[in-house]
Amino acid sequence: MIKNVMIITSAILALFIIIGISLPNSYEIKRTVTINAPVEKVHALVGDLNQWPKWTPWLAADPSIRTTVVQASGVGASQKWEGNSGNGSLTFTSNDPQKGIDFDLYFDNNSYRCDSGFIYTPSGNMTVVSWYMRGSVDFPIVGGYVAYMTESMNSDMFDNGLLKLKKMAEAH
């Protein structure tokens, strides 16, 4: 009996390791929405960190989050946050009112970094907005599992944020 339990446990552990080694440790989340508003209205909400609490999904997911905006807009704009779900910061690395913004995103006291941003594709009075986040989790064996969970847990959050952004931009 004990021998069978040891064999089964060893097989499960070996399977966990083999799958973990084979999974990619990088992730990319990209969600897109078409907004019936010109790019200027979209950028007014995305390019100004003081506007983010109105549409980002994170505050609804964790009401304990407290955000401090260091600089609200432009290249170098940044904010920090703390909440029950953790802490982090972001800094705008580019800010183009016609093309979008890029920012460095840090989590857990700057232990984890990823690239993120918003890409605008103007089309008349409409704007296609793509929100992306990409990075990697460089932990042996479990990195692939964490990368997979990062994608699956945040995709719905991105969708929710983009829908809120759409409603706000179209209402103005």
Image (cartoon, rainbow, N blue to C red):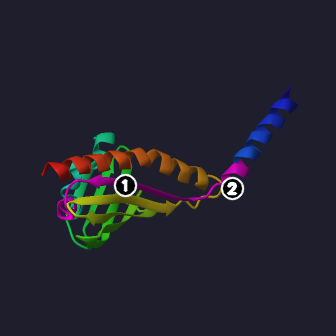
Report the disc number at residue 83: none
Residue at image location 59% in from the left, 55% down from the top? 143
Earlier-in-chain disc, 1 versus 2: 2
Residue 151 image position (x, y, % from top left): 49, 51
- Per the image, label 1 sits on a secondary structure element best described as strand
- Per the image, label 2 sits on a secondary structure element best described as helix
State yes or no: residue 154 in magenta: no
Farthest front residue in view = 124
The type of residue carrying mark 2 is Ile
Residue, disc 2: 21
In the rendered view, tell whether residue 14 sits above or below residue 121: above
Quick one: label 2, few (<14), some, or many (20+) residues within 10 Å? some
State yes or no: residue 29 in magenta: yes
The type of residue carrying mark 1 is Thr
Q: Is residue 62 visible?
A: no
Quick one: label 1, few (<14), some, or many (20+) residues within 10 Å? some
Dot 1 and dot 2 residues touching (CB under 8 Å): no
Residue at image location 79% in from the left, 41% down from the top? 11
Residue at image location 43% in from the left, 48% down from the top? 155
Q: Real-space Cα distance between discs 1 and 2? A: 31 Å
In the rendered view, tell whether residue 92 sits above or below residue 167: below
Residue 15 image position (x, y, % from top left): 74, 45
Residue 116 image position (x, y, % from top left): 39, 63
Q: Closer to us: mark 1 or mark 2?
A: 1
Q: Quadrant of the N terminus?
A: top right
Bounds of the magenta span? 17-44
Residue 106 image position (x, y, % from top left): 39, 61
Residue, disc 1: 32
Nearest the viewer among 28 and 121 is 121
Farthest left residue in view = 172
Q: Is residue 14 visible?
A: yes
